[in-house]
Image: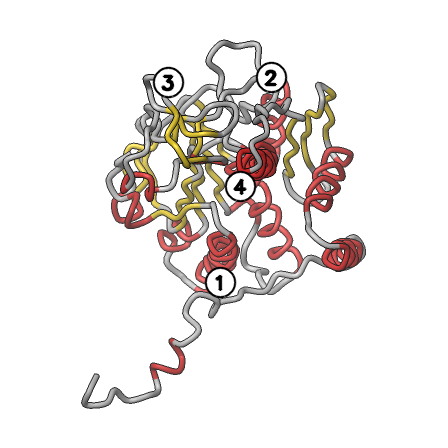
Amino acid sequence: MPIPGLRENAVGFKTIGEAIWLRNRVLDRLDVAVTTLDKAVRERALTFVFVGGGYAGIEALAEMEDMARDALRYYQYDELGASEMRWVLVEATQRILPEVDPDMGAYTVEQLRQRGMDIRLGTRLESCVDGVVRLSDGDSFESDTIIWTAGVKPSPMLEETDLPRDERGRITCLPTLQVVRADGSIVEGAWSAGDSAAVPDLSSKQPGALCSPSAQHAVRQAKRLANNLRAQLRGAALKDYSHRHVGSVASLGLHKGVAQVYGVKVRGFPAWFMHRTYHLSRIPSLNRKIRVVVDWTLALFLRREVVSLGELHQPREPFTEVTRPTSAD
């Protein structure tokens, strides 16, 4: 970045709100495609572009495509065929899912291509002005839906501080999670953890390796940071943060997935089940776990719920449209 047109035409995939918006957007574009007689409008509406081949991009692409297929199969889209949809993944490197071994990434690419998806490796997004996607391989086409999932960036809030940061904008830290300057001196009273912290990975054999910006590290770093704060207040010794990366799991749609946990590689339904089980274990409170299990169990026997939550982000819009502004307004 900056990429021309990206800010005006793309959306991220970092928050729940963005995920719900994307789900609504895909269903909305199916509605547009089925009601128009203009071929160009139809093709543009049915073209979905995802930029970034990490876990966020792959899961978003695979899950949305799977949901859209179900929508075409079970709901009122008789005039549309799955082959009319175009799902494009743009990845600048020559592989996807860098967190797992290359053979697992290659397996994922093969599975996605068998489902008719267009996987562009070694390709960059050059421009998307007015929804016209231009790629570094010379290809160009129009799309109404562009999703950016390429890379994790620290919070822009850090730019307003005087805390020491590395070349990627993350706060430099010691293994104890204390903020440290380039000369090795500690910034008194300053601590950091999670995506915005550059924390040495003591479990890695590579010199200078840092912890990846993932929930695995962030959750555990938060606990270590709290314990170290308490230890410092009590005059006790601080402990270093160290955690060996357990592995990664990714869903490729309903009953499909890939996983690599403690070096063990799993594919298909077992990987999807591991993905669900792991995320269930991370949900707080027994009450919420039971609710999710019941919902997922029913989903095994019932059709997928495909309903757009169109008023989620603008709940007051229908009301303001029918109310008159006052003189003060």
Q: Position of residue 328 (x, y in %)?
A: 19, 87
Mark 4 vs mark 3, CA separation in Å: 43 Å
Q: Residue at x 53, y 41 (%)?
A: 61
Point out the frontmost of discs 3 and 2: 3
Q: Amino acid at mark 2?
A: Ser
Q: Which residue is mark 2?
A: 203
Comes first in the chain, label 1 or label 3: 1
Most extreme residue toward the front is 235
Q: Position of residue 190 (x, y in %)?
A: 41, 36
Q: What is the crowding at mark 3: few (fewer than 14 residues within 10 Å), some, or many (at least 20)?
A: few
Comes first in the chain, label 4 or label 2: 4
Mark 4 vs mark 2, CA separation in Å: 32 Å
Q: Which mark is residue 184?
A: 3
Comes first in the chain, label 2 or label 1: 1
Q: Amino acid at mark 4?
A: Leu
Quadrant containing the C terminus in the rendered view: bottom left
Asked which quadrant contains residue 74, the reply is bottom right
Q: Amino acid at mark 3?
A: Gly
